[in-house]
């Protein structure tokens, strides 16, 4: 599965799906690109060929969580906003650590928000971290933190 920033995921019957919500009912909408999920009650998303959805009640979902990509750059950890054309767009948010970020070239963008474009060859490590949404616990099948191999991470905007 290709993980996207700022997208929620859900565990449903032991499988991980990208998550949205039904605009009409507010129920959860599980999303998949696997045609085999039609056997599990998923239906085609009419306007997106090759994409499938299944609306489920909130109580049918085991967990809801989000992945965030972090980069280790010059020994410090920063959130990765996106990666495009071999350049990682790193951000630092908050007062704590802002002096260190500025010292290594991060520029002020907004109140306690700093940013920097960094060539991927200068990134020491990428880590994907999972965090449960409020009211949920992270399922045991999901690794809380994992190192991402550079060649497995697509060079594209997310």
Image: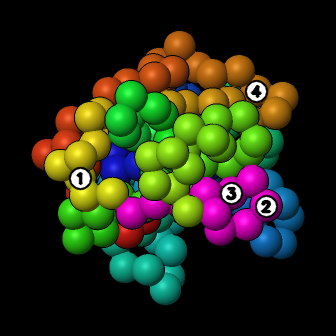
Q: Which residue is mark 2?
A: 111
Residue 113, which numbered label?
3
Q: Residue furthest top?
A: 140
Q: Earlier in the sequence, mark 1 or mark 4?
A: 1
Point out the frontmost of discs 1 and 4.
Answer: 1
Q: Is residue 157 above or below residue 133?
A: below
Q: Which residue is mark 1?
A: 120
Q: Secondary structure at mark 2?
A: loop
Point out the frontmost of discs 1 and 3.
Answer: 3
Point out the frontmost of discs 3 and 4.
Answer: 3
Cα separation between marks 2 and 3: 5 Å
Q: Residue at x 39, y 63 (%)?
A: 117
User: 75 or 69, which is in the foreground?
Assistant: 75
Q: Is disc 2 surrounded by few (<14), some (14 to 19) or many (20+) residues within 10 Å?
A: few
User: 37 or 26, which is in the foreground?
Assistant: 26
- Which span of residues is magenta-colored? 108-117
At which x and y percent is residue 106?
A: 51, 56
Q: Secondary structure at mark 1?
A: helix
Q: Determine which quarter of the picture holds residue 95.
A: top right
Cα separation between marks 2 and 4: 31 Å
Q: Secondary structure at mark 3?
A: strand
Cα separation between marks 1 and 4: 34 Å
Q: Is residue 110 magenta?
A: yes
Q: Is disc 3 surrounded by few (<14), some (14 to 19) or many (20+) residues within 10 Å?
A: some
User: 64 or 58, which is in the foreground?
Assistant: 64
Residue 136, which numbered label?
4
């Amino acid at each position: 599965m290709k993980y996207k920033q700022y997208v929620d995921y859900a565990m449903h019957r032991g499988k991980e799906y990208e998550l949205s919500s039904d605009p009409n009912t507010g129920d959860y909408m599980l999303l998949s690109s696997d045609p085999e999920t039609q056997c599990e009650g998923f239906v085609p998303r009419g306007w997106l060929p090759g994409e499938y959805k299944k609306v489920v009640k909130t109580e049918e979902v085991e967990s809801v969580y989000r992945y965030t990509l972090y980069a280790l750059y010059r020994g410090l950890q920063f959130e990765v906003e996106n990666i495009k054309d071999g350049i990682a767009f790193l951000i630092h948010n908050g007062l704590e650590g802002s002096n260190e970020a500025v010292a290594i070239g991060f520029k002020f963008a907004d109140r306690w928000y700093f940013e920097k474009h960094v060539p991927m060859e200068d990134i020491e490590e990428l880590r994907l971290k999972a965090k449960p949404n409020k009211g949920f616990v992270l399922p045991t099948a999901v690794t809380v933190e994992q190192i991402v191999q550079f060649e497995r991470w697509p060079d594209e905007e997310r």
